Image (tube, rainbow, N blue to C red):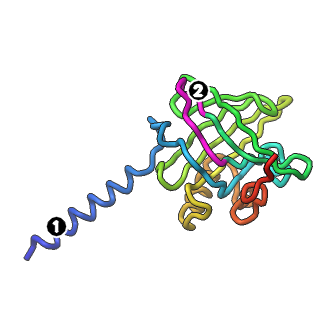
């Protein structure tokens, strides 16, 4: 019975190919990014900017694709000890998955990779007063992701010159995100 082992091999290869194609790194369907997101991990070459009360500690709650192709981000961050809800629009550039916004300097925001249904990794380059800050952020559709997503995020950080000590966990720590104060 050679058919069963061959069939098993074919199915294994098909499954491996399917799983490989789930992760998207270009030619994004930005409409599929729209929806609710939970902050999982952040990393930066300037940790003070992503630590508690940091100006780049942005806790995205929702992303909406606008008709012009730009992205509207609804997020929370701490201002003088209070949780503040903010909406900002990142303007679409000519490059798929790339956006710009003026916030605490000039920013380029890129969607690095996603599977649309579980996670998305964003990269932001901020230039403020001539100083470059690089931020990577992992968001999930649910508040906690499997450890394999952390391993993937660590590898992405390494590709951008950031070590694991540059990574902070945002799960189960964010009172601002979990229970924002209503104004």
In the image: residue 172, left or right of residue 66: right
The residue drawn where x is 60% and y is 56% is 153
Please give the label number shown on residue 7: 1
Q: Quadrant of residue 171?
A: bottom right
Image quadrant where one finds the C terminus: top right
The residue drawn where x is 32% and y is 54% is 17
Residue 93 in the image: state x and y as whole percent: 58, 24
Few, some or many residues within 10 Å of mark 2 (<14, 14–19, 20+): some
Q: How many numbered tags mark residues here? A: 2
In the image: residue 66, left or right of residue 1: right
Please give the label number shown on residue 37: none
Placement of 127 over or under 47, stated as above or below: above
Q: Look at mark 2 in the image and give the residue it sits on.
A: 92
Magenta segment range?
61-71
Residue 73 in the image: state x and y as whole percent: 65, 39
Q: How far apart are marks 2 and 1 (CA)?
A: 46 Å
| Furthest-left residue in this view | 1
Image quadrant where one finds the N terminus: bottom left
Q: Is residue 95 magenta?
A: no
Placement of 102 over or under 168, stated as above or below: above
Question: Considering the numbered disc 1 on the image, is that residue within a helix, a strand or a loop?
Answer: helix
């Amino acid at each position: 019975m050679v058919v069963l082992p061959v069939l098993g091999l074919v199915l294994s290869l098909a499954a491996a190919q399917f799983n490989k194609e789930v992760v998207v790194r270009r030619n994004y369907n930005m409409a599929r990014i729209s929806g609710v997101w939970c902050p999982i991990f952040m990393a930066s070459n300037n940790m003070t900017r992503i630590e508690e009360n940091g100006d780049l500690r942005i806790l995205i709650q929702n992303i909406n694709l606008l008709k012009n192709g730009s992205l509207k981000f609804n997020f929370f961050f701490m201002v003088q000890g209070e949780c503040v809800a903010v909406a900002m629009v990142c303007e679409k550039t000519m490059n798929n998955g790339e956006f710009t916004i003026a916030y605490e300097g000039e920013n380029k925001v890129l969607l690095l990779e996603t599977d649309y249904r579980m996670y998305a990794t964003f990269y932001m380059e901020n230039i403020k007063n001539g100083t470059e800050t690089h931020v990577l952020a992992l968001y999930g559709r649910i508040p906690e992701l499997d450890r394999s997503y952390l391993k993937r995020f660590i590898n992405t950080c390494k590709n951008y010159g950031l070590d694991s000590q540059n990574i902070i966990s945002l799960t189960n720590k964010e009172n601002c995100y979990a229970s924002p104060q209503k104004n």
